[in-house]
Image (cartoon, rainbow, N blue to C red):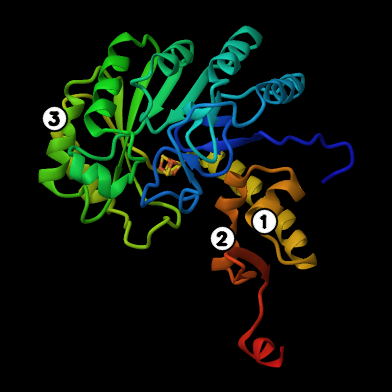
Amino acid sequence: MEKGEKKYKYIYGPVPSRRLGMSLGIDIILYKVCTYDCIYCQLGRTAKKTGIRKEYVPTENIIKEIEQKLSERIDYDYITLAGSGEPTLNSGLKQIIEYLKSRTQIPVAVLTNGSLLFLDAVIESLLQADLIIPSLDAGSKELFLKVNRPIACIDYLQMINGLMNFSKIYNGQLWLEIMVLKNFTDTDEEIKKIANVVAQFKVDKVQLNTVLRPPSEKYAKPVGKKRIKELTKYFECEVEIVGKMSKKNEENRNYHIRNLEDRILSLIKRRPVTIKDISIGLSITPNEATKIIPILLEKEEIGKEFLNGKVYYKKHETEKQKLLR
Ligand code: SF4
């Protein structure tokens, strides 16, 4: 960490985002605390699958960090509440959004899996945000169980009804994200089922996405752009394919990634570390660390090993170095 650089535990970025321009991220949930365990999750398998809402991280501390960050007077396209799990599980959500709305004109976005939108408290929390991006990855209960692997208390129809009701009372922008997966949702039959469900919602647009980073399960495979384009015809509303970033954002993102790569590498050179160690050691969120690790593994700059049920990342060793160990 540079001298004088402020430490943030819950805030990351601004990061260039494919959908939200330059976005300041706020991670309001602990690493992989989620109502789902999606097969495509880029953060790995869910560590704590739960439907219990509580203050997983102290609201007061998050607000202090926001205050500090906003005092830097940097302009962002969005402030995004998301992070390393499902943000609506945090019972401080309403207070955080209210604080942001009272403190800045920057639009507030929330990325959610949409599973808790049947709860009055969650609806009430989200009404003040400017943009909500919920997910919907299945048009049937069977596929929902296979793809999202929800906690038992989340029922498919209850989730759909929650989304539908929310879409009708919410006045901000509502973009629905659908993750298209090979052999799961890339067939005409399955996407038609999803489109029929979406037709009951009042959304501003649908965003079709596919797997771009290493998924939790290897069998969660991406779908080619040509096929995704063909699937857009089934939707009655505006459909956008989540694609590449603008050149400027791509450059900013590359700079941001290189900087993180260097910082993570210098930490790993000293000792083997877990994602949690990286997050604490570099004051970045686990979400950020999880995005950079696959890049370093791919470049063979680091290796990994399993020890006592945990994954440790360490300096890369050649086969010869391993034999000499
Ligand atoms: S993709 Fe999102 S909703 Fe699914 S398990 Fe990961 S964090 Fe949870």
Q: Earlier in the sequence, mark 1 or mark 3?
A: 3
Question: Is 189 drawn above or below residue 81 in the view shown?
Answer: below
Q: Residue at x 65, y 92 (%)?
A: 323
Question: Is 120 drawn above or below residue 242 in the view shown?
Answer: above
Q: Nearer the observer, disc 1 or disc 3?
A: 3
The kind of residue on which mark 2 rests is: Ile
Residue 9 placed where, x, y %?
Answer: 71, 36
Q: For this view, does 106 lie left or right of residue 277?
A: left
Identify the image quadrant of residue 51: top left
> Is the CB atom of the residue marked by disc 2 within 8 angstroms of ligand 1's nearest atom?
no
Q: Which mark is residue 295?
A: 2
Residue 81 placed where, x, y %?
Answer: 54, 27
> Is the CB atom of the residue marked by disc 1 within 8 angstroms of ligand 1's nearest atom?
no
Q: Which SS class for mark 3? A: helix
The kind of residue on which mark 3 rests is: Asn
CB contact under 8 Å: marks 1 and 2: yes
Q: Residue at x 23, y 20 (%)?
A: 201
The residue carrying mark 1 is 261
**Whole-number angstrom distance, CA of label 2 to CA of label 3:** 38 Å
* Ligand 1 picture quarter: top left
